[in-house]
Amino acid sequence: MTESPQLAPSPLDPASRDALAELLLSVADDEFVIGFWDSEWTGIAPMLEEDVATSSIAQDEIGHAKALYEMLAELIGNDADAIAYGRDADAFRHAALLNHARGDWAFSAARRYLYETADAVRLEALARSSDPSLAALAGKMRREETYHMLHADAWLRRLSEGDGEGRDRFSAALVSLWADAQEVFAPLAAEEELVRSGLLTEPMRAMHAAWQTQVRPILEPICGALPQHTPSLDGRTRRTDDFRWLHAEFTSVHRSEAGAQW
Amino acid sequence: MVTAVTRDAREQHVWEALAQIPDPEIPAISLVDLGVIGSVAFDADRLRVDVLPTFIGCPAVDVMRQQVGDRLRELGVARDVEVKVSYIPPWTSERITPAGRERLRLSGFAPPHSGPLSAAGAGLDELTMLSIAECPYCGSRNTTLENPFGPTLCRAIYHCAGCNQPFEQMKRV
């Protein structure tokens, strides 16, 4: 991860640059952390096809994170590896949805559905960003994420259309993750600046509303009425012991071998 | 497909050299036929080449960049050679040339479906309704998608009921 992707020289003023940096970090950390949780299924997924699928999806997500960290590194004059592997657990800015260990297969499938649908709403907005490099990358990510959505949707149907333990576990996982799923749309400190400059085409609360309109009619027939939650100010700063464990895992090579490359 | 643009002799020389570089994962197809060379541009004696990853997380991209850089420096057509990863334009499976599609088939990979995709990428319907792949071994279209995820990010796994063989398809994206 030593080379940066092609980017037009950034004409951004310092306020816009800092705002864009916050936005990039939040999306990159989401993709990075869910990618590592998915990779935990490699070798132990319930069937061979899912072993391949979750590994491939994990590789996509970590690839997206890499591209975003490289864009961020160029913007702020840092090194992408240092951002990805050199930070303390508390400096990560992923949504609280991604704080939980992978759980059982139903839990992972429920989280993936919640994340994929939320991420799709966000990517649609990012593809219209006033930053041409971010817009291009988001557009490319959307094409790949279509396959992830197909996978998440297939598992939602498979686990919810029958009766019995699968549906019960899936439904319970949706209910337990619902509040933290809202935090994908947690307000950013620099959001006003992001919207003013067009880096973000709409505020997080608008995306949050769009996402709920889309997923409630699909989820509520499975798990009953879901409560209303407003994304919280600490939705991207709360950390858990589960995440601290994962962080220790994914930084272990970097800590044991300084300068190791991807 | 690479857009037809007027190329001067020097650019033509570079494109010809790039057409000799095999894809690191499927060596039967060149980087040019795969459509991953986005642009070749000279600024006086500086050369800039954009490489478009097939998938963002493709681990072969660094190898491609290295091979392109090494080959073009050997060529001696520019004082500086810069090879950059770019997403402008995005690589799509439509960029594979007709010759490239044939080479994929000959090496046992069904080429991706052709035809325009919506701007956002393949929608679910486009992927599921159009996912018939022609078996590269026997030509049968009596095939089924086994797994949209395969051994690399860009490949899906199919089964052919005609010759009873599994095969891979390069994904539409």
Image (cartoon, rainbow, N blue to C red):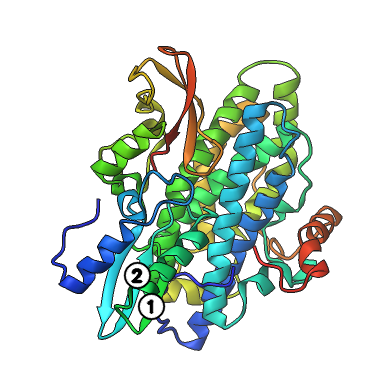
Earlier in the chain: of badge 2 and badge 1, it is 2
Figure quadrant of residue B137: top left
- Residue B68 visible at all: yes
Instruction: Please tell me how crowded label 1 is: few (under 14), some (14-19), or many (20+) other residues with Cα within 10 Å.
Output: some
Q: Which residue is mark 2?
A: B49
Question: Could you tell me which residue is drawn at 34 percent across and 18 percent down?
Answer: B141
Q: Position of residue B109 (x, y in %)?
A: 41, 33
- Chain under disc 1: B
Which is nearer the eye, A147 or B91?
B91
Task: Note whether A242 is above or below A169 in the view shown.
Answer: below
What type is the residue that disc 1 sits on? Val
**Please, what secondary structure does the residue beneath circle 2 have?**
strand
Left or right: B35, with A223 as reference point: left
Give the image quarter of residue A183. bottom right
Identified at 53% across, 72% down, the residue is: A3
Residue A260, horizontal then vertical, whole percent: 71, 68
- A108 sits to left or right of B100: right
Amino acid under disc 2: Val
Spatial CA distance of label 2 from label 1 is: 8 Å
Q: Residue at x 13, y 66 (%)?
A: B6
Q: Residue at x 46, y 87 (%)?
A: A13
Is there one chain holding both mark 2 and mark 1?
A: yes
Please give the residue where the numbered disc 1 appears in the rendered image.
B81
Is A12 positioned to the left or the right of B79 in the image? right
**Which chain is indicated by disc 2?**
B
